[in-house]
């Protein structure tokens, strides 16, 4: 059903994962964090102007006068992306003399990749990095594992491509090492990973790098630390050539510096506004806006809409004790989407009584000026009083529904 595909649909949009309890940071921010915690990372400088880029290129240039210029967006597939101005590629190896031309075509432009969707993401920062001489590429990640109820280290002696591709091509080369957070990573576990990576250089130093990466994961409250590629340099050192870091939103109270790095320009503006009002909103592609209290009920509502031939425009959970101000903002969020042709409000009056909810919904709808059909289904304490308020509101386009099935049918019918 539709709701079970919500996570996959959201993941495809990269930066908008904020709504599902994780903070994502840019490559240069992750490199800075890892470098401060003892992980070998390629030297680089984040820039926001042409002048800064030219100065950074002169510092980062190798013996051949080359640097790597990387677009900073919270989405994968940058190298194969295309800017809306027609320029191809979000990552380029260039001579220092070519950097100004690249900056003009990349900085301040919108990059479209396989993960951004057609709307793309703005490139407000470029990362000018030193071009590394890498002997080989491997894969290493630390993720949360439901089976072991803790972090698991995943390593593969091949790298440079997605873990899905690696699992298909080299399943026998992937190893998984669970770690007990109460104990932390042991020397034996670090060496087990080094062995799985088939490190050819200093294995003791490599083990220390694995420990350092795990230290980043545990001390920064990460939900994911994916280093791809984890490279081996010509002199045998392990280098985190590129890394993706996600952090648990529940840890924001003790990771204030990290969460101050949040780049809201990479997110859907509606989701940013919703988060400020303590609403959980995720924009989708349908035409029926949904306002529901409770995540489970919201998913069920989307399923029922899909079952009756409609398509939900969003996931919106207003919580169990939403105020009139929050409901007003919720209506504004829904109506800001030009694809929304109808709104379905599905509220269970448990903590709050249905008559109070109904009065708030009617008042908010009148304040905002809802100009599309508004279907309201209420259930719970004082439900009959709530339905009476809806029926007697005297608002054109306001439709009362008896149950969720009836609400979904009426919502779909109103736009067919």
Image (cartoon, rainbow, N blue to C red):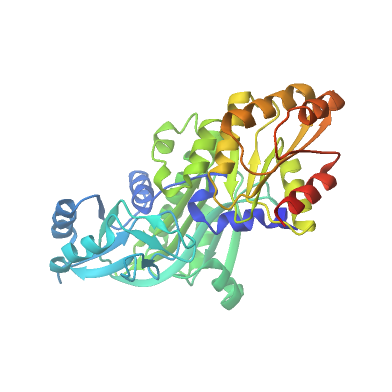
Q: Position of residue 82 (x, y in %)?
A: 37, 68
Q: Which residue shows up at 42% across the image and 62% down it?
A: 203
Q: Position of residue 39 (x, y in %)?
A: 37, 51
Q: Position of residue 234 (x, y in %)?
A: 30, 70
Residue 109 is left or right of residue 365, and the answer is left
Q: Which residue shows up at 42% across the image and 41% down it?
A: 262
Q: Is residue 249 visible?
A: yes
Rendering quarter of residue 65:
bottom left
State the residue in front, 61 or 55: 55
State the residue in front, 398 or 27: 398
Q: Position of residue 102 (x, y in %)?
A: 22, 65
State the residue in front, 210 or 316: 316
Q: How many numbered marks does the figure carry?
A: 0
Q: Is residue 21 visible?
A: no
Residue 376 is left or right of residue 177, and the answer is right
User: Which quarter of the figure is the N terminus placed in?
Assistant: bottom right
Rendering quarter of residue 88:
bottom left
Residue at the outermost bottom position = 169
User: Which quarter of the figure is the C terminus placed in?
Assistant: bottom right
State the residue in front, 293 or 382: 382
Question: Is residue 153 depicted above or below 407 in this figure?
Answer: below
Residue 63 is left or right of residue 118, and the answer is left
Residue 196 is left or right of residue 377, and the answer is left
């Amino acid at each position: 059903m539709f709701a079970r595909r919500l996570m996959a649909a959201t993941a495809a949009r990269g930066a908008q994962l904020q709504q599902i309890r994780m903070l994502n940071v840019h490559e240069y921010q992750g490199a800075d964090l890892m470098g401060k915690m003892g992980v070998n990372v390629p030297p680089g400088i984040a820039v926001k102007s042409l002048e800064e880029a030219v100065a950074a290129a002169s510092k980062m240039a190798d013996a051949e006068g080359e640097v790597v210029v990387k677009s900073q967006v919270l989405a994968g597939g940058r190298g194969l992306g295309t800017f809306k101005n027609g320029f191809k590629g979000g990552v380029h190896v260039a001579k220092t003399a070519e950097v100004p031309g690249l900056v003009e075509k990349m900085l301040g432009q919108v990059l479209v990749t396989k993960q951004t969707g057609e709307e793309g993401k703005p490139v407000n920062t470029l990362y000018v990095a030193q071009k590394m001489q890498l002997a080989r590429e491997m894969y290493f990640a630390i993720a949360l594992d439901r089976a072991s109820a803790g972090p698991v280290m995943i390593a593969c002696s091949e790298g440079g491509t997605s873990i899905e591709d690696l699992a298909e091509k080299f399943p026998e080369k992937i190893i998984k090492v669970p770690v007990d957070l109460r104990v932390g990573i042991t020397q034996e576990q670090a060496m087990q990973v080094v062995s799985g990576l088939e490190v050819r250089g200093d294995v003791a130093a490599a083990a220390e790098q694995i420990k350092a990466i795990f230290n980043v994961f545990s001390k920064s409250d990460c939900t994911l630390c994916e280093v791809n590629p984890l490279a081996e340099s010509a002199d045998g050192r392990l280098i985190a050539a590129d890394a993706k870091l996600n952090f648990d939103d529940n840890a924001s109270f003790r990771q204030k510096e990290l969460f101050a790095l949040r780049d809201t320009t990479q997110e859907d503006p509606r989701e940013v506004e919703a988060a400020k009002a303590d609403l959980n909103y995720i924009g989708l592609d349908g035409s029926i806006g949904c306002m529901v209290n409770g995540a489970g009920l919201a998913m069920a509502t989307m399923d029922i809409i899909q079952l009756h031939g409609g398509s939900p425009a969003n996931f919106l959970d207003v919580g169990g004790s939403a105020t009139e101000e929050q409901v007003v903002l919720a209506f504004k969020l829904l109506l800001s989407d030009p694809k929304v042709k109808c709104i379905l409000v599905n509220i269970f009056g448990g903590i709050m009584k249905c008559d109070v909810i109904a009065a708030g919904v009617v008042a908010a709808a009148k304040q905002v000026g809802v100009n599309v059909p508004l279907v309201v289904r209420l259930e719970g304490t004082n439900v009959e009083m709530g339905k009476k308020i809806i029926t007697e509101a005297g608002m054109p386009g306001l439709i009362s529904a008896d149950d969720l099935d009836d609400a979904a049918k009426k919502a779909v019918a109103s736009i067919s």
